[in-house]
Every structure is written in C-alpha cells, then in structure tokens.
Amino acid sequence: PQAPPPGHNPYAQAPPGQPHNPYAAPVSDAGPAWGMGMEEHGILASRGSRFLGSFLDGLVYMLALIPMLLIIGIGGSSGDTEAIAVLGFAVPMLFIAFFQWYLISTTGQSVAKRMLGMKIIKTTGEDVDFVSGVLMRVWVPAFIQVIPLVGGIFPLVDALFIFGDEHQCLHDKIAGTKVISI
C-alpha cells in the first residue's frame, strides 16, 4: 500500500479547498489500501467465504466417492470388490484433483472459488500459474504434512494464519498468493 503524502491528515473534516463543516463526519482520502480489507489489487476475500470455499471443494471430492461407496455396500467385501474399490476411490479423486489443478492454473479459481466469486492471484496482482497456484500452494503444504512431528501441526498453523491482516493462510504466504473477491 502507498502511504499518503506528507502533511496529509486522514481525519480532516473536509477535503482541501472546501469549507470546514464542524458537523460533518471525518473523511479520508487515504485510498482503498488503508483498511476495510481493501487491497491495491482487489478486495480480499472474507475469512468466512474462504472457509466456505474450502468446505465446498472438499465436498466435491466427497460427492465423487458416493458411487463407489454404494458399490462396496452392495457388493460386500470380496477380493474383487476391494480391488474395484481401490480403483473406484483413486480414479475419481485423481480426476477431480487434476481438474481442480487445471482450473487453478488457468483461471485462478477452483470449482468452489468460481461458485463463490473468488480468485487466487499473486501478491503482485498477477494471475497465478501452475507453480504458484498448484505446486507451491497445494503440493508443498501436502509434502510438509507428511513430515514427522511438523506435519501433524501444519494444517492447524496453516489455517490460523488466516486471522492476520492480509487474510492469508500459511500456504498463501509460501506461494506468494492471496484470494480476492471478484
């Protein structure tokens, strides 16, 4: 964010050149980057909408598994059913993962972000690519989660970072990204 010019008074009663009104509310021309979740490159997505987006993206994965759960429930637990179940779980999950990664790499939006009007961008304001949107934002945190001792606490620390002023999770900071409302 750019700082206001020297001598600027953000609590002035009237803009320069206009008469003073003692009953007017204070005004500010400090710009959109000075509070209220405004950023130079758009309005930051709210914590609630980001949580809902994460929940909905997880729900997309879960819905893909329903047909296979039904097959397992109907077929019992024979050797053939278990092999089909492994393929039935892996194939839909990989399909959805690849589709989500493609969307993020090309549009900056997952299925849920598109539904909720959010977009991932780099902190510089540029669009994300595969490296920043998928590799750094998804794969590196997933790798950290499998590290003994550190991995168990990483998801909690990652999520708690959202309460900072920038509304960035730890995976956003790692990737140099932020999520904005569009």
Image (cartoon, helix red, strand yellow):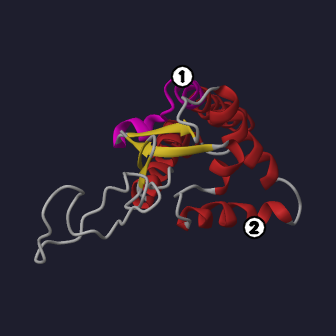
Q: Is residue 124 above or below residue 127?
A: below
Q: Residue at x 72, y 39 (%)?
A: 136
Query: Residue 85 location, x and y as percent?
Result: 65, 37
- In this rendering, would 21 be left or right of 168? left
Q: Residue at x 87, y 56 (%)?
A: 147
Note whether residue 78 is visible: no
Q: Which residues are magenta?
A: 99-116
The CA span between labels 1 and 2 is 31 Å
Residue shown at the point (47%, 53%) measured from the top left? 55
Q: Main secondary structure of the magenta part?
A: helix
What residue sits right under mark 1 in the picture? 106
Q: Position of residue 182 (x, y in %)?
A: 35, 38
Magenta stretch contains residue 102: yes
In x, y percent, where is residue 14?
20, 64
Q: Which residue is mark 2?
A: 153
Question: What's the residue at 37%, 51% (across, down)?
Answer: 32
Q: Position of residue 138 (x, y in %)?
A: 67, 41
Q: Is residue 16 visible?
A: yes
- Tag 2: amino acid: Ile
